[in-house]
Image: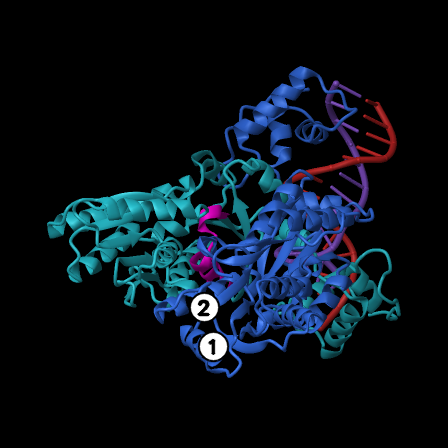
Chain colours: A cyan, B blue, C purple, D red
DNA sequence: TTGTAGGCGTTATCAA
DNA sequence: TTGATAACGCCTACAA
């Protein structure tokens, strides 16, 4: 160890670990050992402290690209989130996932996935994540690109039993003596697949219980008039619809609001059940709650397993719970 | 140019640009020129095509960390998003910002900011972004860490004129002959600062118009009972409160739902005005709409200016618009 | 028109 | 216990 330097924080560029080594009068390797707490390399307490102090003094901050290049792997987990999946539940899942990953030295970074904003190969030149989690489906070609880049992939929505959600909705309404059900189907094309699965669950349940086919109306949550149109259509039917399964709570709440605007009351004049248990729906909406914590744990388990190249063993479970309130 | 190799995609590791060079029988430099479309380096069409084909065949995908290390800069713009800012408007702003950045070769990656999940210096070892955009405030120490890392910073919420939002709410209600206003204040501590600014705007407007101080009630959107408590408190006041400014649409909608559950109707029995213009509120809620497009453009301009080291010159404007519906 | 060589910051290996 | 050195993948000034 030679004469420590007394350099102040470098003005122009950020301080590298080499700067710290120079200023401390030790080798770059020693600095690396100290800064990364490498086990088995017993460094003298004095040297250790000196390096730490110098790093602090120079304002050294590790540089991710260099680390990743050297280690051959990134610690970034990229969440590709489709527009429709951006919402209360998905945010909670991502939040939890982030927490779980933080304990293992990874960061979760979310990126909006558009399907065509930017080719995957280009994206990879900008971020090269260790693993990708998708919230909502990817285009097939993009999945292929991810495979080509030898990047691990977890499909979070694959764990969501949408058909079962529909079954729970219909099953509950039937248990409350409703026989003629309606289904509020979202118009958003991005969400169509999921919506179909949920509707299929409702249909299957109706069939098994000997109820007639649900009466489907499309609703666009961006256009209130479609909500009124749906309500009017159900009211106009001969065999009266007495209960509605809404694709999600947002639509369910809009139906309730539409009723209120017509001087009617949800739960009394028309039963409505939603999905998600979002905060605005908690005033009175009966719903199928998606347990974000449970879901996130399952996703986290899959992700960490794949990152560690071990088999995933999360317990089966559907993270669903019926919450009964006044709307149905 | 020598004998082209006929290697298939490398099994174990991903193909590097050196692999492409080897397989094409050209130098690594040539590969780089072709792949990056470097101007001024006229490469023969044949060579060009050969390299392109080989890259495709080997499944070469550029490796971001190596690029960043070499170029000395990352193309990642990191959005640090506070929990409370995750919502309809912020999501739209980020969406637009992403679009604007994509045109300039940057990616927007969002990361939940917690205040204490992970020290900034550690985060920097995982991602080293070119610039940070904050949605919601950062701890002072974290802002310092960002400065220390010589990373550029744009505070998106700094562009949001919260006081003016409150003024617009109160001004509109006063124009509808309401004289005794209430304010639904959120309990979430993360949101407190913004809420204070909005409330201050309401207060100032009341003062200037000669109205009494607004009657403040706290509401927690996660707990419906607080909504009922607030409604009861306003109803119990001697000088009756006839109109409520809600901190945001979510709370506003909950107030409307609370009224409906009590057999009352928003707009008729109590006026309510929100902020944001979220979809569920569009059935009937009068609100101060935040123009996500305009806001995002302003943020994008700031971000791109800073990235390009040029002064930002976005036009002033407050991105606010009053939307009158039935609730007030 | 293409090739050579050097370096970005970090860390693993090996030598001292 | 610590230090020198090479290597990760990519880019580019310069040479040929």
| Label 2: how many Cα within 10 Å (few below 14, some 14–19, many 20+) | many
Is tag 2's residue or tag 1's residue first in the polypeptide sequence?
1
Quarter of image, res A191: top left
Residue B230 is tagged as 1
| Label 1: how many Cα within 10 Å (few below 14, some 14–19, many 20+) | many
Residue A93 inside the magenta-drawn segment: yes
Left or right for A1, reference A179 = right
- In the rendered image, which residue does mark 2 sit on? B255
The residue segment tinted magenta is A81-99
Q: Secondary structure at mark 2?
A: helix
Above or below, A296 relative to B212: above
Above or below, A216 relative to B10: below
Task: Find residue A226 and report its horizontal and vertical position in percent.
Answer: 38, 44
Residue A75 is tagged as none
Left or right for B265, reference A46 = left
Please say if the residues under marks 2 and 1 sit with CB atoms less than 8 Å apart. yes
């Amino acid at each position: 160890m030679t004469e420590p330097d007394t350099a102040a924080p470098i003005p122009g560029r950020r301080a590298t670990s080499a700067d710290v080594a120079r200023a401390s009068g030790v080798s770059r390797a020693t600095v690396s050992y100290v800064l990364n707490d490498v086990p088995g390399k017993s460094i003298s307490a004095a040297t250790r402290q000196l390096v730490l102090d110098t790093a602090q003094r120079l304002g050294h901050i590790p540089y991710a690209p260099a680390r990743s290049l050297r280690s051959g792997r990134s610690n970034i987990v990229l969440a590709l989130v489709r527009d429709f999946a951006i919402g209360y539940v998905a945010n909670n899942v991502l939040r939890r996932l982030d927490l779980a990953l933080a304990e293992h030295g990874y960061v979760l970074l979310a990126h909006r996935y558009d399907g065509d904003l930017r080719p995957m190969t280009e994206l990879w030149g900008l971020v090269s994540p260790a693993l990708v989690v998708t919230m909502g489906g990817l285009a097939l070609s993009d999945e292929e690109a991810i495979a080509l880049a030898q990047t691990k992939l977890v499909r979070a929505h694959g764990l969501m039993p949408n058909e079962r959600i529909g079954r729970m909705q219909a099953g509950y309404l039937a248990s409350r003596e409703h026989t003629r059900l309606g289904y509020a189907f979202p118009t958003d094309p991005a969400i169509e697949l999921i919506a179909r699965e949920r509707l299929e669950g409702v249909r299957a349940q109706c069939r098994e219980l000997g109820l007639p086919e649900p009466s489907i109306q499309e609703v666009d949550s961006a256009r209130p008039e479609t909500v009124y149109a749906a309500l009017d259509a159900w009211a106009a039917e001969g065999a009266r619809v007495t209960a509605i399964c809404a694709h999600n709570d947002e639509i369910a709440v809009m139906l309730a609001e539409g009723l209120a605007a017509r001087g009617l009351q949800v739960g009394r004049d028309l039963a409505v059940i939603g999905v998600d248990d979002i905060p605005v729906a908690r005033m009175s909406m009966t719903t199928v709650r998606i347990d974000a914590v449970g879901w996130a744990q399952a996703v986290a388990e899959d992700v960490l397993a794949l990152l560690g190249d071990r088999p995933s063993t999360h317990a089966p479970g559907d993270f669903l719970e019926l919450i009964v309130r006044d709307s149905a």
